[in-house]
Amino acid sequence: MCQVPPTRRPAGLDERTFSHAYRFVKGQPTVPLVRLLNKGLSLVRACPSSGNFSSFATFEQVMTKINKTEQEWRSELTPEQYRVLREKATERAFTGEYDHVFEPGTYHCAGCGAELFVSDTKYDSGCGWPAFYAPATGDAVEEETDTSHWMTRTEVLCANCGGHLGHVFPDGPHPTGQRYCINSAALKLEEE
């Protein structure tokens, strides 16, 4: 069962910040799990209708999440980037620009520029898409259940703009055992 915003302001939290956080959560009930924090205080938890608590964000991250119209996204992205990031398409295996690239650097979201993965965690999984065993930081990506195509998978999204990146599977190498299988079209490599 989802927890709803508290009706009373927590001690130590100014009224303006609390009321803004309360309105945000009430106005956005489909936000996956949001744990709003301000000055170290846990303000509120919200979750999708499934009741699963799977991802966390700070108050500042939630309030600054990128929100553009589909027309704006279309004008800023290439057709392939739009198809992958906004329409949740998958590029064909072994065709992506970064599948066999192992140069040192940082992989950013092609939609918003947020840092997603670092080359130190990239490996050749043989799956046909760039594979990483961990995101750059714990809050760089969000995960959601994907039941499309008659199967259940875990979808990976950019935490900053909500763009579809790919999927994560529990068959990766140590130390995490995770394989983040990511579309090249969703990434931009900034080489060191």
Image (tube, rainbow, N blue to C red):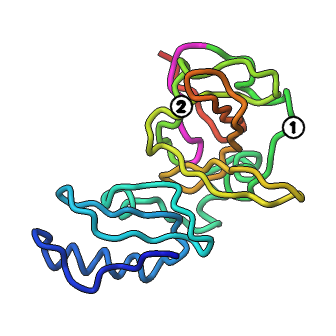
Q: Amino acid at mark 2?
A: Phe
Which residue lies at the image location 49% right of the left edge and 41% below the top edge? 113
In the image, 183 versus 3, the foreground residue is: 3
Q: Amino acid at mark 1?
A: Arg
Is residue 109 part of the magenta span, yes or no?
A: yes
Q: Residue 59 colored magenta?
A: no
Give x and y (percent) for residue 14.
13, 73
Identity of the residue drawn at 74% across and 27% down: 97
Residue 97 sits above or below residue 37 on the image: above
Quadrant assignment, res 27: bottom left
Please, which residue is most extreme toward the left here?
Answer: 12
- Residues in magenta? 103-111
Q: Position of residue 23 (x, y in %)?
A: 35, 82
What numbered label is drawn on residue 179? none
* Contact? badges 1 and 2 (CB < 8 Å): no
Q: Secondary structure at mark 2?
A: strand
Q: Nearer the viewer, residue 54 or 111?
A: 54
* Location of mark 2 (residue): 117
- Residue assigned mark 1: 92
Dot 1: element:
loop
> Which image quarter: residue 121?
top right
Above or below, 21 against 98 in this view is: below
| Foreground label between 1 and 2 | 2
Q: Residue at x 37, y 60 (%)?
A: 64
Q: Residues within 10 Å of mark 2 (few under 14, many from 20)?
A: many
